[in-house]
Image: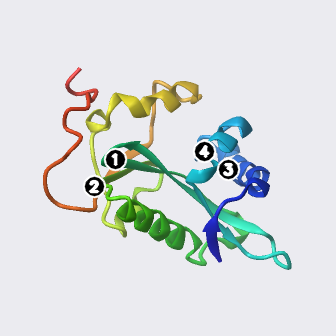
Amino acid sequence: MIRKATINDVKKIYDLLRIYGDRGELLVRPLTELYDHLRDFWVFDQGPRQDGVAGCCALQFCWEDLAEIRSLAVHPDHTGQRIGTELVHRALAEAEEYGINRVFTLTYRPSFFRQFGFYEIDRGELPLKIWGGCLNCVKFPDCDETAMEKRLHPGPDRGRGLMTLRNK
């Protein structure tokens, strides 16, 4: 079952993200940041008789028409069960509900996101505002993730006035 994360899920989310963080495949977020952004998270809950939280995904709003899918992780024992796919669908549906025009992600798995209609973009097209989290990354400033974007609603880009790396 996919549901919004609760306060009791934070340490489980942290442990799940650490699995991929230790492999260098994901940025591990400190517990304090997870508590701060708890409302951004969806979890796949297997229930109390199973393994509990088997996956997580966050949708973080960045601007009036821009959001980021981040911290997508599925426990290695549960990969191949479409949990990640369902979490991304849920995050995209939430973006739609809020009228978001553009959703982006920074990923090591671009082929996974292509199935949802994401396409690669130059990181310089992203607003400077999103790079605040990157300052804490061990790979900064040599990020090797692929920036990808999906347009949910064709038409004018309401966030054009927002400064990007390209126009700085």
* Extreme residue toward the right, this view: 49
Q: Which mark is residue 101?
A: 2
Q: Which mark is residue 17?
A: 3
Point 26% across, 27% down: residue: 163
**Measured Cα–Cα span from mark 2 to mark 3:** 27 Å
**Measured Cα–Cα span from mark 3 to mark 4:** 14 Å
**Measured Cα–Cα span from mark 1 to mark 4:** 17 Å
- Quadrant position of the C terminus in the picture: top left
Rendered location of residue 154, percent (x, y): 17, 60
Three-letter amino acid code of the residue under disc 1 = Leu
Sooner in the amino-acid sequence: mark 1 or mark 2: 1
Kindly state the secondary structure of the residue where label 1 is placed. Answer: strand
Point 34% across, 50% down: residue: 148
Q: In this view, does 112 lie to the left or right of 1?
A: left
- Tag 4 residue: 37
Three-letter amino acid code of the residue under disc 3 = Leu
Mark 1: give few (<14), some (14-19) or many (20+) Cα within 10 Å.
many
**Measured Cα–Cα span from mark 4 to mark 2:** 21 Å
Q: Which of marks 3 and 1 is in front?
A: 1
**Measured Cα–Cα span from mark 1 to mark 2:** 6 Å
Sooner in the amino-acid sequence: mark 4 or mark 2: 4
Please tell me in which quadrant of the rendered image residue 137 appears: top right
Three-letter amino acid code of the residue under disc 2 = Asn
Q: Which of marks 2 and 3 is in front?
A: 2
